[in-house]
Amino acid sequence: MKAIVIGAGLIGLTTAFELSKAGIEVEVVERSVVGSGASRGNAGEICPEQATPVAKLALIVSALSQAYRKDSALHVNVGTLPGYLPFLLRVARNSLPRRYSENQSALAEIQDLAMSAFLELAEEVGLEASSDGYLSVFADEQSAREGRQSTLKRTSGSGIPHTVSEVLGPRDLVEIEPSLNAHGYGFLDEGSYYTNPINYVEALHQHLLEAGVSIHEGVTVTSVTDFEGRQRVRASNAHFDADAVVVAAGVGTADIASASGKPVPIRPGKGYSFTIDVPHPTSHIFKFDSAHVAGMPLAGNSLRIAGTMEFDSDAHRFNSDRIKQIVAAVAPYLPEEALRNRYNEWVGARPLTPDGLPIISKLPSLQNTYVASGHNMLGLMLSPFTARAVRDMVLGHSTSSARRFSASRRF
Ligand SMILES: Cc1cc2nc3c(=O)[nH]c(=O)nc-3n(C[C@H](O)[C@H](O)[C@H](O)COP(=O)(O)OP(=O)(O)OC[C@H]3O[C@@H](n4cnc5c(N)ncnc54)[C@H](O)[C@@H]3O)c2cc1C
């Protein structure tokens, strides 16, 4: 059996890895280069037990009330708002309490499977996943208390053990992470994992090359069709035939699925990140919670700062105001000089769906083509779970764990 995977982001790479391990001949077709979408510059959080659907009432309220403000964590590019309206209406429907709780329980159902799939894959490809945990920091004590309560609530029913500290004051925070300014209140959540996404992309890439998987870079796929009992992947200047196809093209999935007979509602939700060098090595993920910004330890004294959500139909356009918004949000907590000397500024588009759940499903318009996309803010942590579910679909095995993620559900 031969399979083509479209897209060499984390979802495409892990899927190719699982398919290849199952004895399937795999080729990957990538528009740009491996890991060029949202996969390298993200925050590296692995906490499926804390994941919530992005479709929240608060998002809609925020979109309507403050999205045009330059200092808001959520920003809408004015020119592209009309294109987002049908999507936002669906987000609004999914924010209603009953739908939100159904979507939340769909994520809760898979949290333990997702976590064990991640840890097993990490071990297999030699990827380090740290469980030192997250240090959440808030501007005031009351917000820290509320944040702690909601973390306790989200982690209490999970099979992944957590230890959540009492609320900590400015001096306690600096004792745990000496690179922080003595400002704010917070708590330590030990048990949540993180990994370096660059290492993850590279480990998978290396394993695929060693397994003999061909990766065609610089090839833009336009559509997939049924062709003489097989699947034909049409690209700008070539075509590829296979027994099965997996569309894992991140935000590019929408155009491919539409041209292949089954539109799927995926829109870009752009995030930004940059790197700073702080005075001391760090070992926890920082969650600057009221600002919706995360800080992830990289090698040495480097820290990646990532956050913001921008609705803009141009997934690649770089808006330096968004970087400034992140810098302003974390300025009270991190050394001014480090922020001034930031580098590796990056933009990546999260593939958003209106209900905040991924699409892991057969594409109903075609004989043997599958979609693995729409992972919103959860693509890194759900990639091994997704890859296993897609592998089982391609092999015709039962995939009950992915039943809530159909391309035909009511979004
Ligand atoms: C700032 C930020 C922070 C984040 N933090 C986290 C986190 O802490 N934890 C977490 O789990 N997730 C996080 N995410 C989300 C995560 O990065 C995404 O969900 C994930 O990268 C999606 O992976 P993907 O493979 O579906 O898409 P991508 O990584 O975007 O990969 C898609 C690939 O498909 C290619 N492609 C597109 N169109 C075509 C085409 N027509 N033909 C061929 N190839 C094509 C692209 O070039 C790209 O390489 C974050 C995202 C951002 C932006």
Image (spheres, rainbow, N blue to C red):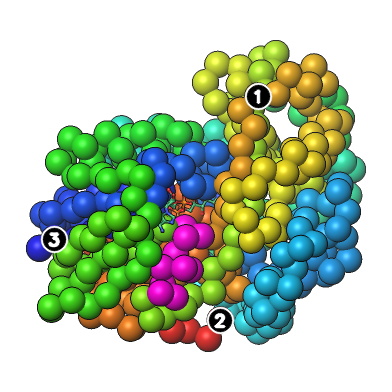
Please state the horizontal and vertical placement of residue 175, each as a whole percent of the image. Answer: 74, 21
Residue tagged 1: 343
Q: Position of residue 289 (x, y in %)?
A: 75, 46
Q: Can see residue 187?
A: no
Q: Earlier in the sequence, mark 1 or mark 2?
A: 1
Say which residue label 3 marks: 2
Q: Main secondary structure of the magenta part?
A: helix
**As rendered, which of 27 and 13 lies closer to the eye?**
27
Which of labels 1 and 2 is toward the front? 1
Q: Amino acid at mark 3?
A: Lys
In the rendered structure, are the residues bearing label 1 and label 2 in contact, judged by CB atoms less than 8 Å apart?
no
Residue at 44% x, 75% y is: 258
Q: CA distance from mark 3 to mark 1?
A: 42 Å
Ligand 1 within 8 Å, label 2 CB: no
Q: Is residue 359 above or below residue 30?
A: below
Mark pair 1, 2: CA separation: 39 Å
Mark closer to the chain start, 3 or 1: 3
Q: Quadrant of residue 249?
A: bottom left
